[in-house]
Image (tube, helix red, strand yellow):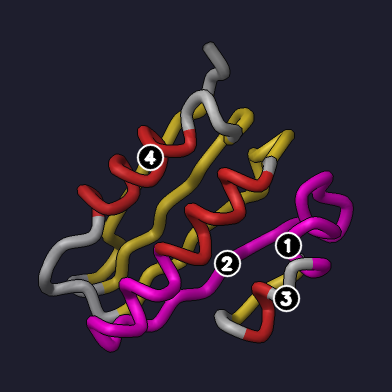
Amino acid sequence: MTEASVDAREPEPGQVEIAVRGEVDLANAGLVEQRVQELITNHAGSVTLDLGGVEYLDSAGLRTLFTLASRLELLQVLLEIVLPTDSPVRKAIELVGLGQVVALRIE
């Protein structure tokens, strides 16, 4: 099975920072999505999703990001995705137009 880890912290009340590492594909995208959803409390006002540690992201992983963006939009929670300039998944995220739905921060 493909390995991915999801960790979170809340530096300030209502501000959730989630870091995903590893590979996100069809084998584990559902588990990654479930874990991310669990980490976002009802009191969240903003979510920063750091994908700097993601080495591989397939279409199931991209669907997970769009699902998260839709859910947070309904809840009126701001979502920002952080990607390193040289991230292997950056091009895929930009190609599918995710940046038109959520804020992308390229570092």
Q: Is residue 13 left or right of residue 77?
A: left
Q: Amino acid at mark 1?
A: Ile
Q: Earlier in the sequence, mark 4 or mark 1?
A: 4
Residue corresponding to mark 4 = 7
Residue corresponding to mark 2 = 81
* Cα–Cα span, label 4 and label 3: 26 Å
Quarter of the figure that contains the C terminus = bottom right
Q: Which residues are magenta?
A: 68-95
Q: Amino acid at mark 3?
A: Gly
The residue closer to the viewer here, 33 or 18, is: 33
Residue corresponding to mark 1 = 93
Residue corresponding to mark 3 = 97
Across and down, in percent, residue 89 comes to 77, 49
Residue 98: image quadrant is: bottom right
Q: Secondary structure at mark 3?
A: loop
* Cα–Cα span, label 3 and label 2: 13 Å
Q: Are the residues at dot 2 and dot 1 in contact (C-beta closer than 8 Å)? A: yes
Name which residue lies at 40% across and 75% down.
70
Q: Residues within 10 Å of mark 2 (few under 14, many from 20)?
A: many
